[in-house]
Structures are given as C-alpha cells and as structure tokens.
Image: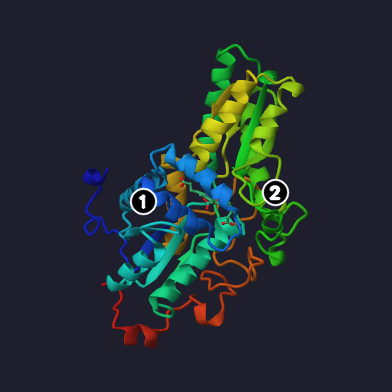
Amino acid sequence: MSGSSPDLQTAGGVSPSTLEYDAVLLAGFGGPEGPDEVMPFLRNVTRGRGIPDERLVEVSHHYQALDGISPINEQNRRLRAALQAELERRGVRVPVLWGNRNWAPFIADVVAQAARDGQVRLLGLATSAYSSYSSCRQYREDFGLALQSTGLVGTVRIDKVRPYHDRPGFIDPFIDGAKAAVAQALSAGLALEDLELVFTTHSIPMTMAASAGSASLGDHTPTGAYVDQHLAVCGVVASALESWFGRPLSWQLAYQSRSGPPSMPWLEPDVNDVISGLPALGRRGVVVIPVGFVSDHVEVVWDLDNEALDTATSLGLWFHRVATPGTDPRFVSALVDLLMDRLEPALAPPRISATGCPARPDFCAAQCCVNARGPKPTTAAVDSAADWQQLDVDPARLAASGIRNAP
Ligand SMILES: CC1=C(CCC(=O)O)c2cc3nc(cc4[nH]c(cc5[nH]c(cc1n2)c(C)c5CCC(=O)O)c(CCC(=O)O)c4C)C(CCC(=O)O)=C3C
Ligand SMILES: [Fe+2]
C-alpha cells in the first residue's frame, strides 16, 4: 500500500506541524514472546491485584501450550502498521508508536523515546473498545505512571481516544463473521432454531462493573456501562442477523476468563456454563461471538477455541467461534476516523454510533471508571489530578527540559 501512496508533501498532506498531536500511541495489553517471559509477564499483570497463585500457574499453562508466545504483540504490530498505512493513504503524516501496559515495548520506554524524538503531544489509542477500569481507566493510569516514572510530567502530554464499541467499523466484522457462521451451520444441516448466538466478553469484578463510566454521564445504571455497552453491541449484531436470515435468533451475553478468588463476585454466567445449558434449551449448535475483544489473543484462542470448544464438543454441539476485528480494513478505518477527530478536528468525519449509546467524551468525566484501590496518576480526564493535568503542556517546563517540539 505504501508504494502506491502519493507523496504527502506534493499531495498537500497534513503533517504534525498542523496537527493537534506529534504522534499516535497505540497502547496494547502486551504478552510474552517466549517461555521464560510467561511468569514475569503474569506477575506484571497481577501485581497488587489479589489474584491467587494457583490461577497464575493455571494461566501459565495456557501460554506454555502456545510455546510461551502470545499472539497479541504480533497482532498489535500489524495493527500499528495498518493504522500508519491508512493515515498515509489519507495524506496524514503522523508517526504511530506502539507500547504495552504489561510487557515490552513498555509504554514508559516508548514515551521516553518519543520525548527524545521531540514528540511531546501524544494521542493514545487503546486496544479496548469499552468503558471500565480494566478496559479504559487503567490505560490512562499507565499513561500517568509512564509520565511519572520518566520524569516527563508537564513536558509530555498524553490524551486518549474515547471508547469505540459503538462504531460500525468495530461491529460490522462481527456481523459478517456471525452471518458466515450461521450459514455454515445451516449447510451442515442445522436450522436457525437449533442455534444459540453466545456473545462473550471478559468477566470483571461486579464492583468494577458497577463503577464503569461516570455518574455524571448517567453510566451508573443497575447493570453498569460496561454491561450496557456490550448488550447494545450484541443487539446490533443480533438484529443484523435477524434481517439477514428473516427471523430472530436466540442470543445471550456470557462472560469468560474470570480470574479473581471465588469469594469475590465477578460478572456471570461463564461461557462454559451457558454452553452446558444449551442442550436443555433444545439447541444443537452454538456460534460464539467474542465482542469484548479486538484481536484473537490468548484469552480468545485458549479460553474459547480450546475450553469452550471442548465444552461444546463434549455435549455433541456444533461449534463455531467468530473472528475478532483484528486488522479488518473497516475496523482500521474506524480507528483512523477516531484519530482524525482529535488530530485534525476540521477534517474529521461525523461521529456515528451504531448502538444508540451516546458517543463517549474525548476527555473522561470526573471519577470515570474509578477503582476502589485508590487514586493513581491519570491523564486524559477532566479530573486528572492537578499535577497530572495534561490538557496543556506547560511551555516553561517544555523549554527547561531542552526537548523541542517536532519540526
Ligand atoms: C476487561 C478486560 C480485558 C479486555 C480489555 C483489554 O483488552 O484491555 C482484558 C484483556 C486481556 N487480558 C489479558 C490477559 C490477562 N488478564 C488477566 C487478568 C485480568 N483481566 C481483567 C480484565 C480484562 N482483561 C481483570 C479484571 C483481570 C484480573 C486482574 C486485574 O484486575 O487486572 C491476567 C492474569 C491472569 C488471569 O487470567 O487470571 C492475564 C494473563 C490479555 C492478553 C492476552 C494475551 O496475552 O494474548 C488481554 C488482551
Ligand atoms: Fe485480562
């Protein structure tokens, strides 16, 4: 693709000097890339989170079964390249950097290098589409902690693109995958009423689900914004299938990859329990649609393609797991639309929502997705504590640091 893109200067492309940011920072979860990296990675993920050791050992087996290599970093390298190519195609000259929360390349190291390169206004983009502490605020905290640990508070500013579950470019790949799966089931001799669509997402503690989003935005409903946003996405997929196949399909939202101690309530039902109950409902097949995730990483390929598949197979159920958006061009394009909202508001396409959920604000509201464990530095929220307020880079501190802005 890059070979065919026009020269940005002669094409009158936009470059950082006219953009609101110097670089985009794709923020991933991170994963190990070799057997020796598995336990240190798991300790990074669970530090201070009260996850029992037995659970860590169990999860390490999932990674070791894949030779200690999570596919997630490679997926994010590809997503980074796809975002860069799509920005170039649109004539927008801005580097896309990539850093992880839990494994190398760490966000702090990437931010330090960005600052050395003169990139002091960074626009974060998380590989997570929904509101909650784990899926949104924790990325903002990792930005805040990165600025703290590198001494770049007040010198570098890191904003964050809002949660994007409502974008058609995120949802359409799930719709296509689910249509194809149902068509396959039909050609395997099943009828529509034999099938259950089981949507899945990461389980989180009930307390985290209750505090997702912000009270001032009306997010603290009885189910909470995390669950509400997922149900809205499931509804869009289910109604697209209903129009396509001419009658409604039975569906439900299930949760996967729970990790806390049994004494702590997490979102239920578990996907395996849901599948186990399907024969009693008269179902003969299941289409699993992992709407909670953007790529086919370990939680998808292990927890669904192994565990959930085993559960279904042992009951004689037909099983198909739908792919996540990954680098589907529609998803990449939707992410670039979101970036354009912030990079060059004048050129940004209209903000469209497929779900009816109102678009999230560019800066998180007060106390958004707050975590009971207590405050950590954050960025990209209206209440990011004064010292961490990144809405504007302080010119005096910028000058004193010797860092220059990108030319
Ligand atoms: C909401 C959510 C997402 C979706 C949003 C997003 O994508 O950000 C997500 C994604 C992911 N979770 C992942 C891996 C893990 N999550 C863990 C633990 C936890 N996840 C939680 C929530 C979420 N997790 C929570 C509340 C915990 C308990 C500990 C804590 O409160 O933080 C653990 C510890 C061991 C265990 O599973 O118990 C691991 C290894 C990987 C990488 C997969 C790979 O390597 O390919 C990915 C993409
Ligand atoms: Fe997780």
Give the quadrant of the C terminus: bottom left
From the top left corner, tell me how far across and down residue 321 is, in percent.
54, 30
Image color mode: rainbow
What is the tally of numbered marks visible in this picture?
2
Q: Is mark 1 within 8 Å of ligand 1?
A: no
From the top left corner, tell me how far across and down residue 248 is, in percent.
70, 27
Viewer-proximal residue, 7 or 339? 339
From the top left corner, tell me how far across and down residue 400 is, in percent.
33, 87
Classify 393 as above or below 326: below
Amino acid type, residue under disc 2 in the picture: Pro
**Residue at left offset 30%, top offset 79%:** 403
Between circles 2 and 1, the one closer to the viewer is: 2
Q: Is residue 54 visible?
A: yes
Viewer-proximal residue, 258 or 288? 258
**Residue at left offset 52%, top offset 52%:** 128
Question: Could you tell me which secondary element the residue under label 2 belongs to?
Answer: loop
Quadrant assignment, res 272: top right
Viewer-proximal residue, 272 or 285? 272
Distance from label 2 to label 1 (Cα)? 37 Å
Do tag 2 and tag 1 residues touch (Cβ < 8 Å)? no
Q: Would residue 45 be found to the left or right of residue 215 on screen? A: left
Residue placed farthest to the right in the image?
A: 222
Q: Which residue is mark 2?
A: 262
Question: Could you tell me which secondary element the residue under label 1 belongs to?
Answer: helix
**Residue at left offset 69%, top offset 35%:** 252
Q: Which residue is mark 1?
A: 80
Q: Is residue 325 visible?
A: no
From the top left corner, tell me how far across and down residue 6 is, in percent.
23, 50
Q: Would residue 2 be found to the left or right of residue 397 on screen? A: left
**Residue at left offset 49%, top offset 57%:** 43
Give the quadrant of the N terminus: top left
